[in-house]
Image (spheres, rainbow, N blue to C red):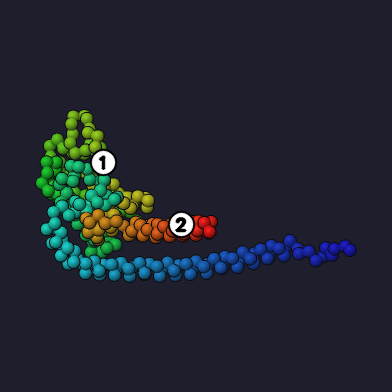
Amino acid sequence: MVADRSKKPKVSDKGENLDEIDGELVLSIEKLQEIQDELEKINEEASDKVLEIEQKYNEIRKPVYDKRNDIINAIPDFWLTAFLSHPALGDLLNEEDQKYLSSLEVEDFKDVKSGYSITFNFNANPYFEDTKLVKTYTFLEEGTTKVTATPIKWKEGKGIPNGVNHEKKGNKRAPTDVSFFSWFSDTEQKDDIDDIHDEVAELIKDDLWPNPLTYFNNEEPDEEEGDEDEADDEGKEDESDDDDDNQEDDDEGEEDAK
């Protein structure tokens, strides 16, 4: 049987079908974009509401933080102990830094979207004149973060050569760990989105500052506690299995004796 070639679609018909499909696809994408724009608008409104609530509760927290500071001030080396006990921050302070850090404070700007500051208070020391050093993070509209810090007035012969040590000894540098002051003095503006996040500052602001007592008491994180509980449960299961095996062996021995 010979196929009826007259039933094949014409090339022009294929072109019309493709145009129709392309037109429907474009229309669907346009509608999808409208919905996506609507979702983005809702997300922006939600973010604004969250910030408004955060700002409201910052005002509520402030007198409580002040009350907390009054108690902390009566505890010797509270902030130093908490800082050193933090697993990600403790190594930032070398032995000399530890002698003089007395306290710290985090304060959000009145408009929380604008930024925050971290204040470090020091005891009188032989290295620099200042007793209060402030590092500030200002969030700019173009998505960059402006970082500023109190210029450190080093005493004669003191400083941080290449951010490593306090004391200059001619052209030689003592091989010490990276100092807290190398981080503090880093005020390079962050333009790249990957560089905007200062891990040290965020750990101080969002982890150490809200609950320093956890680190002062050197408490184990909840995750580890959960792991320990799980390990204990596994240990009990193993002991139970061993007891069952021993009981089976005893039963078999009694049967053999009979």
Q: Is residue 154 left or right of residue 236?
A: left
Q: Residues within 10 Å of mark 2 (few under 14, many from 20)?
A: few
> Which quarter of the rendered picture does the N terminus lie within?
bottom right
Query: Which quadrant of the figure has residue 211?
Result: bottom left
Is 41 in front, or is 227?
A: 227
Dot 2 amino acid type: Asn
Residue at screen point 41% across, 57% down: 239
Mark 2 or mark 1, earlier in chain = 1
Is 156 in front, or is 61?
A: 61
Residue at screen point 25% across, 54% down: 218
Residue closest to the far right: 1
Secondary structure, mark 2, is: helix
- Residue at label 1? 178
Count every numbered label the image shows and give the total: 2
- Residue at label 2? 246
Is 40 in front, or is 156?
A: 156
Query: Which quadrant of the figure has residue 144?
Result: bottom left
The disc placed on residue 253 is none
Q: Nearer the viewer, mark 2 or mark 1?
A: 2
212 up-or-down from 55: above or below? above
Dot 1 amino acid type: Val
Task: Check contact, mark 2 vs mark 1: CB within 8 A.
Answer: no
43 up-or-down from 155: above or below? below
Query: Which quadrant of the figure has residue 26?
Result: bottom right
**Residue 221 percent coordinates (x, y):** 31, 57
Label 2 – label 1 distance at C-alpha? 57 Å
**Residue 238 percent coordinates (x, y):** 43, 57
Residue at screen point 17% across, 67% down: 63
**Residue 2 percent coordinates (x, y):** 88, 62
